[in-house]
Amino acid sequence: MSEQLRSVRRVVVRGRVQGVGYRAWAEYAALKRGLEGWVRNCCDGAVEAVFAGPARTIGEMVEECRHGPPGAWVDVLDHHETDPNDLARRRPGELFSVLPNE
């Protein structure tokens, strides 16, 4: 993948996003799009994720995160470009990891 097209974006989703399968949904949706990264629950009730891949594909994933899985209710979605080193939190050998809670 061309480095010019590669992006790494951190997303924090707030609302009714824990206890509704949001992490499993995010993992499935990211892998379906060929994205790398990770997702985890935060102690404040949010879900945090990092997605890496083509900028356009990440943009599509961020838009999907505004809705999430059935049962989710997204009040706020913050996202910004982040350091590629954030990918180091993934489990070895996995393209996308569901991490333990923060």
Image: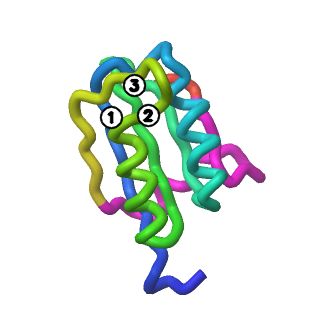
82 vs 89, left or right, is: left
What amino acid is found at the position of numbered circle 3 in the picture?
A: Cys
45 vs 91, left or right, is: left
| Local secondary structure at mark 3 | loop
| Local secondary structure at mark 2 | loop
Q: Nearer the viewer, mark 1 or mark 2?
A: 2
| Local secondary structure at mark 1 | strand
Query: Picture coordinates of residue 79 (x, y %)?
Result: 28, 50
Q: Nearer the viewer, residue 88 or 32?
A: 32
Could you say which disc has been placed on residue 88 in the image? none
According to the picture, the residue beneath numbered tag 1 turns out to be: 13
Tell whether label 2 touches label 1 (CB within 8 Å).
yes
Q: Residue farthest to the right?
A: 93
Is 94 within the magenta?
Answer: yes
Query: Picture coordinates of residue 69 (x, y %)?
Result: 49, 29
92 vs 3, left or right, is: right
The span shown in magenta is 81-99
**Gap in Å between the C-alphas at discs 3 and 1?**
10 Å
What amino acid is found at the position of numbered circle 2 in the picture?
A: Gly
Query: Around disc 1, counting alpha carbons within 10 Å, would you say few (fewer than 14), some (14 to 19), or many (20 or more)?
Result: many
What amino acid is found at the position of numbered circle 1 in the picture?
A: Val
Looking at the image, is 23 positioned above or below residue 82? above
**Gap in Å between the C-alphas at discs 1 and 2?**
9 Å
Is 8 within the magenta?
Answer: no
Query: Picture coordinates of residue 23 (x, y %)?
Result: 54, 31
Which quadrant: the N terminus? bottom right
Q: In the figure, residue 27 lies in which quadrant? A: top right
